[in-house]
C-alpha cells in the first residue's frame, strides 16, 4: 500500500472508532457483516432496530479514487432493512451487503472530508447528527414487508433492482408461494434485464433456497471485498520487461536453430523465466510464430507484412463493431444457470486449456459466433466443473463453453479455491477466456487464472 493509502487507512480506522462510540451511545451497533479492510470502500456500517425484524441502516463510505488521496472523503447512505433478508442476501449471491431494501443518499452534494486523525471525533459527531435521525425515520416509514415491497415496485428505471428485491422480500417473510409466483412473472417479462446473468443467477439461487426448506440463516455470512486490481506497472518496469523479452527472443533465435517447435517453446519459456517475464500461452505461440518467420528468407519483411495484415484486420473488425454494435448473445454460448458464479481473480495471468479432440467443430462455431471478435481472437466465457464430480484425487478440471465441454486444465490446483467458493452455493464458476484461431487451422484457448504467487 502506498504512503497515501496508509494515511487514508489510518483516517478510516480513527473515524470508524469514533463513529462506533458516538452512534453506539444512540443505540446503533456496528454491522459485523461488512468488510472494513483498507481496500474496501466501506468505512463503517451501523444498524439499529426500529421494530421486530426491521432495522435502520447507516453506511459511511469513500468514493473510488486513483491514485489514493491522503485525505478521506466520506459519503453517507441510509436504509430501511428487513432483518431476515439481511441475513439471507449472501445466500442469494449478493457480493456486498445491501444498505437496505429502501435507501437514500444523505448530503450527496456535500461530501465531508477529514484530513487529520485529530478531526475524527468532530467528524463522527457531524455525520451522526445529519444521518442518524433520517435513517430511523426512513426505517420506521417502511417497517413492514408490504411497505418495502410497495416501495420497490413500479419504477421502470429500477427494474433491475425490483426483480430481485421483491421476490427476495416475500421469500424471506415466509411467503414462499407468492415469491415463486412473482419470480415466474418477472422471468416471463419481455425485458432484456431478465435474460442477464445476474438475474439468471439470482433466480437459480432463490429457487434452490426455496426448494431446500427456506431456513433463514441465524447470522449473515461475512462479506469480503474483492482484492483490488493489480496496479499497472511503471514506465521503467515496462521498459525493463521489453528489453528482457527481446533478449529472451534473441537467445532462442540464436540457440534454437535446427530444433523443433517443441524444443524452441521449452527454451523460450526458460529464457523468459530466467528474466522474470511471464507471457500468456497465446503470446508464447505468437512469439514462436515470429521466430519461425524471421528464420525464413526475407523473414523480417514477411513478419512486417503479417503485422500490417493483422492490424488491418483489427481495424476492419473494430469499424464493423462501431457501425453495427455487438450482436445479441447466443443462448447456446452462455453458461447454464448453475454456472454463473463470477470469478474475481484480479490477476493478469492466463492458463491454457488442453482441448478435447472432438471439440474442433464446436470451437469453430463458437469462434464464428462470438459477440466480440477482433482479428483471430474471440472473447468467450468458459465455465468449469470437476470431472468426475464430486471431486476426488483423480478428478480433472473440465472447461466448457456454452452447452459443450471443450477441454481440461492441467493445473487444476490453481482453481481449487475458486471451485470451493462456488460449491458452497451449489454453483460452478465461470471465467473469461480468449479463443484464438491458429495458422494451422487449430485453436488455442486460454482463460483467466488465479495468480501463481
Image: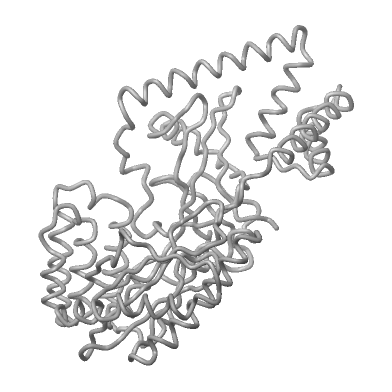
Coordinates of residue 32 in the picture (x, y in percent): 44, 82
In percent of the image, x 26 and y 73: which residue is there?
79
In percent of the image, x 70 and y 58: which residue is there?
453
Coordinates of residue 162 in the picture (x, y in percent): 19, 62
Residue 442: which quarter of the image?
top right
In percent of the image, x 34 and y 69: which residue is there?
76
Quarter of the picture holding the N terminus: bottom right
Choose between 447 and 32: the one closer to the eye: 32
Coordinates of residue 92 in the picture (x, y in percent): 33, 69
In percent of the image, x 47 and y 33: which residue is there?
378
Q: Can residue 201 be seen?
A: yes
| Image label count | 0
**Left or right: 102 as drawn, with respect to 347:** left
Where 398 sits versus 299, above or below? below
Residue 269: which quarter of the image?
top right
Choose between 442 and 324: the one closer to the eye: 324
Where 17 sits versus 63, above or below? below
Q: Can residue 213 be seen?
A: no
Amino acid at each position: 500500500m502506498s504512503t497515501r493509502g496508509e494515511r487514508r487507512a489510518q483516517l478510516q480506522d480513527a473515524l470508524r472508532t469514533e463513529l462506533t462510540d458516538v452512534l453506539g451511545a444512540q443505540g446503533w451497533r456496528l454491522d459485523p457483516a461488512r468488510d472494513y479492510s483498507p481496500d474496501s470502500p466501506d468505512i463503517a456500517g451501523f444498524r439499529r432496530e426500529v421494530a421486530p425484524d426491521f432495522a435502520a441502516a447507516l453506511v459511511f463510505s469513500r468514493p473510488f479514487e486513483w491514485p489514493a488521496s491522503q485525505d478521506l472523503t466520506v459519503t453517507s447512505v441510509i436504509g430501511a432493512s428487513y432483518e431476515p433478508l439481511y441475513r439471507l442476501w449472501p445466500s442469494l449471491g449478493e457480493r456486498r451487503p445491501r444498505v437496505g431494501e429502501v435507501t437514500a443518499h444523505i448530503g450527496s452534494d456535500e461530501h465531508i472530508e477529514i484530513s487529520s486523525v485529530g478531526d475524527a471525533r468532530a467528524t463522527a459527531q457531524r455525520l451522526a447528527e445529519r444521518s442518524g435521525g433520517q435513517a430511523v425515520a426512513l426505517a420506521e416509514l417502511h417497517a413492514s414487508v408490504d411497505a418495502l415491497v410497495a416501495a420497490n415496485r413500479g419504477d421502470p428505471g429500477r427494474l433491475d433492482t425490483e426483480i430481485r428485491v421483491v421476490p427476495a422480500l416475500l421469500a424471506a417473510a415466509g411467503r414462499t408461494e407468492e415469491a415463486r409466483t412473482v419470480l415466474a412473472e418477472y422471468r416471463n417479462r419481455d425485458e432484456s434485464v431478465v435474460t442477464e446473468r445476474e438475474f439468471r443467477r439470482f433466480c437459480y439461487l432463490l429457487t434452490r433456497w426455496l426448494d431446500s426448506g427456506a431456513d433463514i440463516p441465524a447470522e449473515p455470512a461475512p462479506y469480503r471485498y474483492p482484492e483490488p486490481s493489480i496496479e499497472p506497472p511503471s514506465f521503467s518496469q515496462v521498459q525493463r520487461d521489453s528489453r528482457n523479452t527481446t533478449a529472451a527472443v534473441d537467445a532462442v533465435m540464436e540457440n534454437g536453430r535446427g530444433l523443433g517447435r517443441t524444443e524452441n517453446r521449452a527454451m523460450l519459456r526458460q529464457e523468459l523465466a530466467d528474466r522474470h517475464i511471464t507471457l500468456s500461452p497465446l503470446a508464447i505461440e505468437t512469439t514462436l510464430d515470429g521466430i519461425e518467420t524471421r528464420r525464413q528468407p526475407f523473414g523480417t519483411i514477411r513478419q512486417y507484412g503479417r503485422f500490417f495484415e493483422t492490424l488491418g484486420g483489427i481495424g476492419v473488425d473494430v469499424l464493423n463493431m462501431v457501425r453495427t454494435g455487438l450482436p445479441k448473445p447466443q443462448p447456446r454460448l452462455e453458461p447454464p444457470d448453475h454456472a454463473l458464479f463470477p470469478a474475481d481473480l484480479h490477476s493478469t495471468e492466463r492458463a491454457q486449456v488442453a482441448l478435447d479432440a472432438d471439440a474442433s467443430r464446436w470451437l469453430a462455431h463458437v469462434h464464428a459466433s462470438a459477440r466480440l471478435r477482433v482479428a483471430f481472437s474471440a472473447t468467450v466465457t468458459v465455465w468449469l466443473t470437476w470431472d468426475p464430480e464430486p471431486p476426488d484425487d483423480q478428478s480433472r478440471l473440465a472447461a466448457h463453453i456454452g452447452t459443450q465441454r471443450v477441454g481440461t486444465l492441467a493445473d487444476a490446483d490453481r482453481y481449487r479455491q475458486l471451485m470451493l467458493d462456488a460449491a458452497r452455493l451449489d454453483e460452478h464458476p465461470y471465467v473469461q477466456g480468449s479463443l484464438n484461431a491458429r495458422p494451422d487451422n487449430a485453436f488455442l484457448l486460454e482463460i483467466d487464472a488465479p495468480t501463481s504467487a
